[in-house]
Image: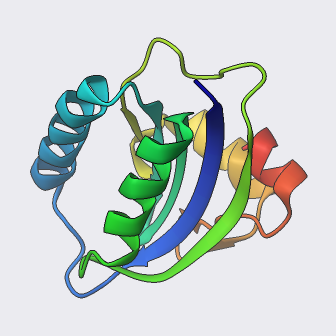
Amino acid sequence: MKRCRLIYKSQAAGDFPSNTMLRDIEETARQNNSTHDITGLLLVSGNRFLQVLEGPYTEVNALFSRIVHDKRHRQVELVTFEALETPYFDNWNMRLVDLYDLPKGPRELMAQKYPHDEGSILIPEHIHEIYAL
């Protein structure tokens, strides 16, 4: 079965979800993704999201289509879609990382490396910076 990696970024539409809601989203995604053999990472910074999805082409594409039509997102932008040679997240059906929740030291280091706005790290524009993030 062909596998792929898809990375997209988006912004929250309307009110930004609370930490409790984000953890619920993570748990629901973890359960749904395990059923479809999808793994990945959801990075949150302020009202911006960056998500990496890895798994079977058909399943990842179907999930991305649902995300594009999800009213909780706006400005959904496909960053990359590629054949998967080496999985990065083979043990994570979904992992949520909120950059705001990082300890002060790592957050300050990231603010030196990446553009930021009102305390939130901005999702980089270039693919090599996204992979580094």
Percent x, y of residue 122:
64, 68
**Relative to 34, residue 116 above or below:** below
Can you name the residue that lies furthest to the top here? 91
Q: Compared to 87, does 98 lie above or below? A: below
**Residue 27 appears in view:** yes
Q: Nearer the viewer, residue 83 or 117?
A: 83
Q: Position of residue 132 (x, y in %)?
A: 80, 40
Q: How many marks?
A: 0
In the picture, the quarter occupied by the C terminus is: top right
Residue 125 picture location, percent across and down: 79, 70
Which quadrant: the N terminus? top right
On screen, residue 22 versus residue 117, left or right, reads left
Q: Is residue 126 left or right of residue 71?
A: right
Closer-to-camera residue (44/66): 66
Give the colour scheme shown: rainbow
Instruction: Tell me which residue sits at (46%, 11%) in the image.
Output: 91
In this rendered view, identify the residue nearer to me: 50 or 20. 50
Q: Is residue 80 above or below residue 101?
A: below
**Res. 113 in view:** no
For the point 64% across and 38% down, which residue is it? 4
Residue visible at 65% across and 22% down? Answer: 88
Q: Quadrant of residue 78?
A: bottom right
Report whether 131 appears left or right of 95: right
Q: Choose top left, top right, bottom left or bottom right for residue 126.
A: bottom right
Residue 28 at x, y percent in the picture: 15, 39
